[in-house]
């Protein structure tokens, strides 16, 4: 979980939970596709981010069952929330592991944020599983 450098309108700290990272292409043509959630413990939203030559982020608010409730991107502002997400992701290094028998792309198996190492769940594990600390082996690359 990555802490965003801001506090929401409810006074809670904003966080970004990365659930999946895929790498498309290699070197200067690389595109990181990131799925996860952003929230402040009161409201959460699903996110899809592409980091590459044309970075973009999509935010899908999660509302109450009856469709009511304050949404995170309404309280903070969609453009501000996107800016905070990009700012946080700019500080992260991704851990790449070569895929046996393939030249490119490598597989993203974890990330580092402020010295903390996180291993992403394997593809066959549920997306809600707990992140594990990364072990030695793969190499690190900034997006």
Image (spheres, helix red, strand yellow):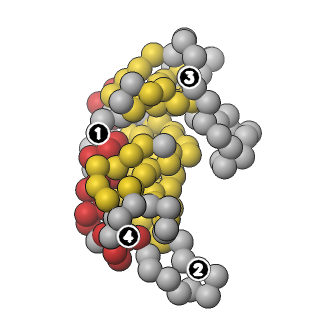
Q: Earlier in the sequence, mark 2 or mark 1?
A: 2
Q: Quadrant of residue 90?
A: top left
Residue 88 falls left or right of residue 35: left
- Between 114 and 128, which is closer to the camera in this rendering? 114
N-term mark: 1 or 3: 1
Disc 2 versus disc 4: nearer the observer: 4
Q: Which mark is residue 64?
A: 2
Q: Locate residue 35, reporting x and y percent.
A: 51, 51
Location of mark 4 (residue)? 10
- Label 2, label 3: how many angstroms apart (C-alpha)? 35 Å
Residue 135 in the image: state x and y as whole percent: 57, 17
Q: CA distance from mark 1 to mark 3?
A: 20 Å
- Closer to the chain start, of discs 4 and 3, is 4
User: CA–CA distance between discs 2 and 1?
Assistant: 32 Å
Which residue position holds label 1?
90
Q: Is residue 13 above or below residue 76?
A: above
The residue lying at 29 percent from left, 30 percent from top is 28
State which tag comes first along the sequence, 1 or 4. 4
Q: Few, some or many C-alpha atoms within 10 Å of disc 3 (few <14, some 14-19, many ≥20)?
A: some
Q: Nearer the viewer, mark 2 or mark 1?
A: 2
Contact between labelled residues 4 and 2, with CB atoms less than 8 Å apart: no
Mark 4 Cα-neighbour bin, 10 Å: few <14, some 14–19, many ≥20: few
Task: In this rendered view, identify the residue nearer to me: 72 or 42.
Answer: 42
């Amino acid at each position: 979980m990555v802490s965003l450098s801001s506090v929401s309108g409810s006074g809670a700290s904003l966080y970004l939970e990365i659930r999946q990272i895929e790498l498309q292409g290699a070197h200067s043509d690389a595109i990181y596709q990131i799925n996860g959630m952003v929230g402040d413990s009161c409201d959460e939203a699903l996110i899809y981010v592409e980091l590459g030559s044309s970075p973009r982020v999509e935010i899908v608010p999660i509302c109450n069952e009856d469709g009511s409730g304050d949404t995170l991107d309404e309280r903070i502002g969609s453009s501000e929330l996107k800016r905070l997400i990009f700012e946080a992701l700019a500080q992260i290094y991704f851990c790449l592991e070569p895929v046996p028998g393939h030249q490119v792309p490598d597989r993203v198996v974890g990330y580092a944020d402020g010295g903390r190492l996180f291993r992403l769940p394997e593809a066959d594990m549920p997306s809600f599983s707990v992140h594990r600390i990364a072990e030695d082996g793969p190499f690190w690359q900034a997006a």
